[in-house]
Amino acid sequence: MQNKNSIHWGYLAGIISGITYGMNPLFGVPVINKGLDVNSLLFYRYGVATLLMLAYMLVAKRQIRITWRQFGLMAILGVLFTGCSITLFEAYKYIPSGIATSILYVYPIMVALIMMFFGQFPSWKTWISIFAGVAGAILLSLKGGGGFIDWRGIALVVASGLCYTLFIVIVNLSEQVKAIPNLTLTFYCFLIGSVMLFSMSGFGVHLNAVPDAVSWLNVLGLAILPTAIATITLAASSKAVGATKTSILGILEPLTAIVIGTLVFHEAFTLNVALGVALILFAILFMILTEKKA
């Protein structure tokens, strides 16, 4: 039986994860606008995060050693987490980002359905939060442009959502993973992701250089906030309050991205965006105030 402090920390961790992951555009867009390709940016993102976390773990004498069985699970989680980013960015080549967001943020329903197979049935209150959050994310995405719907884009974004769903579910259900500290878990996920991205670049042959010092600062910000901190708190939240509720808290990501887009990149704040924000806030508050682990 979990204590209230653990559950409250789980909610806070999920909120931090959603908000920090939503900072991707703040650091990523300026670098992409300067000409750095997405694959190179993702490699630098995971590579810098891996080095920073390794340095911290060595200085702070945190656990690095894990069993071979745990390493196998970390390899799976690393591939899933990195695959989520790769497939989402690839989907943008075929369908508008707004439509991609609409499809991606149906993943809390995917999480809830998978968890039901393992005997964890969400309450009707949790289902209200799920559908309110998903509806809010869809409304936020309607600010994106229209365009021809290519089945390849839909398949890629569904794959992205499935990767993210499986990551959350495995972290929540695996006793081997639960035994690994969140910092250690995140480090190995990024290490695997960095190796995966490096190999996909032809072992460095197709990597492009970061354009300038300001771009390096953005890469550093990308590695720390929407990468390291977002993933550590995602794992902590999933362990504390369950995969389903963590996935609902993750819908704070598009809300944060919208706020950044409006305040930093001067994007339009329309009525449907306002309604989407209201629905997401309702979903989060309703779930927390009617707390019961699902």
Image (cartoon, rainbow, N blue to C red):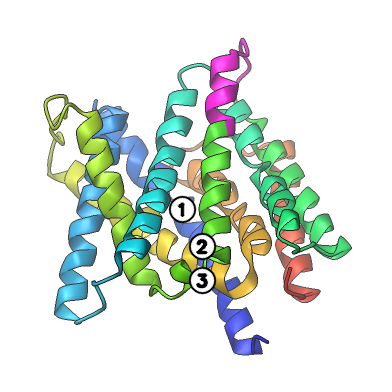
Which residue is situated farthest in the right direction here? 124
Residues packed near mark 1 inside 10 Å, few (<14), some (14 to 19) or many (20 plus)? many
> What is the C-alpha distance between the residues marked 3 and 2?
8 Å
Q: Quadrant of residue 61?
A: bottom left
The picture places residue 123, in percent across and down from the top left corner, at 84, 65
Q: Quadrant of the C terminus?
A: bottom right
Which residue lies at the image location 65% right of the left edge and 85% below the top edge?
A: 2
Which residue lies at the image location 29% right of the left edge and 31% below the top edge?
A: 39
* Callouts 1 and 3 close, C-beta under 8 Å: no
Task: Say above or below: 289 vs 271.
Answer: below
Q: Which residue is mark 1?
A: 21
Amino acid type of the residue that numbered disc 3 sits on in the rendered structure? Glu
Q: Is residue 272 left or right of residue 63?
A: right
Q: Nearer the viewer, mark 3 or mark 2?
A: 3
- Please state which of residues 283 and 30 is positioned toward the viewer in this rendering: 283
The picture places residue 184, in percent across and down from the top left corner, at 32, 69
Q: Which residue is mark 2?
A: 171
Q: Which mark is residue 111?
A: none
* Callouts 3 and 2 close, C-beta under 8 Å: no
Q: Which residue is mark 3?
A: 175
Amino acid type of the residue that numbered disc 2 sits on in the rendered structure? Val
Magenta stretch encompasses residue 147? yes
* Callouts 2 and 1 close, C-beta under 8 Å: no
Q: Quadrant of the N terminus?
A: bottom right
Secondary element under disc 2, as helix, strand or loop, is helix
The picture places residue 255, in percent across and down from the top left corner, at 59, 49
Chain-order first, disc 1 or disc 3? 1
